[in-house]
Amino acid sequence: MPAHAQTSTDAIVAAGRRLLEERGADALTMRDVADAVGVRAPSLYKRVRDRTDLFRLILEDVTDELAEAMDAAADSGDPVADLRAMAEAYRAFAHANPVAWGLLIAPQPQPGATERSVRISATLLLTVAALAGERDALLAARTLVPWVQGFVTMELAGTFRLGGDVEQAWRFGLDHLLIAISRPDPARRP
Amino acid sequence: MPAHAQTSTDAIVAAGRRLLEERGADALTMRDVADAVGVRAPSLYKRVRDRTDLFRLILEDVTDELAEAMDAAADSGDPVADLRAMAEAYRAFAHANPVAWGLLIAPQPQPGATERSVRISATLLLTVAALAGERDALLAARTLVPWVQGFVTMELAGTFRLGGDVEQAWRFGLDHLLIAISRPDPARRP
DNA sequence: ACCTGAACACCGTTCAAGT
DNA sequence: ACCTGAACACCGTTCAAGT
């Protein structure tokens, strides 16, 4: 007589993500995840291959949600406003999910880009192209995006230790970068 | 009769750092470190409080070396050349010590800034001030530094997946950022 | 079909006993 | 003083046995 399913992959991923954010990556044990979904640890292996696979599934979920948030933010049609909105959405997501986001940008794992994350990369590149020109789009994206990622990493890590207004620094940096990657307006040339 | 010391804190830290870089953070076990220095695992606890403490000591060592490399690089007296040299030294160090550097910029640990790292922060801020002006120095530093960190993070993590020349992107970004944070030259004003 | 207790190999860490 | 084997609690994971 078949035993009925007590849990699901979705429930395991959701519980894992919650535990990850609450207690950190090291504290995410298979036994705790199993407890959270109401089974014993060995049962998890019917749904996920191993702990690494669970991390992969969690990071896919996080990646997808981040991409969706950025996609929803960029809706004005104006390149500068859209890039600002995407940067703000990225930063807000990182603040709301610091542990998961930290894993997302860590060197080791490649959570296998989701469709949504591939799409948002394409959208971002197109938006940058509208500002910097087709030819310099990739170079300009690699000027803007690392700054956003680095800034958020540093503020979440508490690396900004010399005082000052972090919000002001965010605006200052974003303003200067958007100007720096803008193609000079042909109408203003002599 | 007292047993003679078979190892030292320095040897333990050096072995730990080597293992860390060779096999990654998760593979850095107390038993392997003990093996590498020729004692049994329990003996390590005479020199380091616990594994977390060992990581702290390793990261202090790494921090100090990075600060020294950046300090040695900035010797021209010209702000732009010095900032370029510091950025290059930082990037080269990260490429040479990717795992340790990854831990250095990770959210969790604060390896307790060494004297050298505090000094290099001050030097950096002064150099930026010479370029951006006293008033905007902190804002300008928080525009330049996160980009450098973010760029290196992304290239080491393999996040630049859309092709293109990464070296060109590094030069493009650095050039544009240095211009962006430069105070307009008063001599060029009408 | 899925769930479970028992077990295994591994890890960080402690400690009494050695020299 | 420092080193060690033995031991403990914990972890990821496997598997035979249950329903």
Image (spheres, coloured by chain):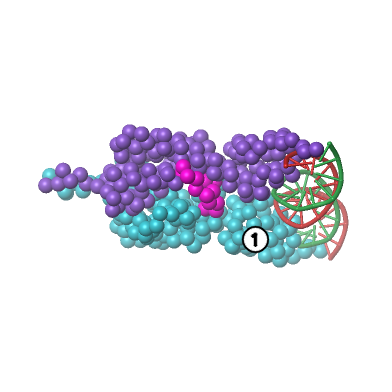
Chain colours: A purple, B cyan, C red, D green
Residue A109: within the magenta? Answer: yes
Identify the image quadrant of residue B14: bottom right
Q: Is residue B109 magenta?
A: no
Q: Residue at x 71, y 59 (%)?
A: B31
Q: Chain of mark 1?
A: B
In this rendering, does residue B18 appear at all? yes
In the image, what residue occupies the spot 70% across and 64% down? B35
State which quadrant residue B37 falls in: bottom right
Give the amino acid type for the residue marked by disc 1 in the picture.
Ile
Which secondary structure, mark 1? Answer: helix
Residue that appears at 34% across and 45% down: A126
Residue B68 as seen in the image, left or right of residue B26: left
Q: Residue B32, how many percent across, how many down?
A: 69, 61
Which one is in front, A177 or B89?
A: A177
The residue that label 1 is drawn on is B12
Image coordinates of residue A154 in percent, x first then y, are 46, 44
- Residue A167 in sight in this render: no
Q: Quadrant of the N terminus of chain A?
A: top right
Residue found 34% across the figure and 52% down from its top:
A138
Where's residue C4, x and y in %? 80, 39
Left or right: where B30 falls relative to A152: right
Q: Which one is in front, B166 or A113?
A: A113
The residue closer to the viewer here, B65 or A185, is: A185
Front residue (pair A188, A51):
A51
Q: Residues within 10 Å of mark 1 (few under 14, many from 20)?
A: many
Q: Which residues are magenta?
A: A101-117
**x, y percentage for residue B57?**
59, 54
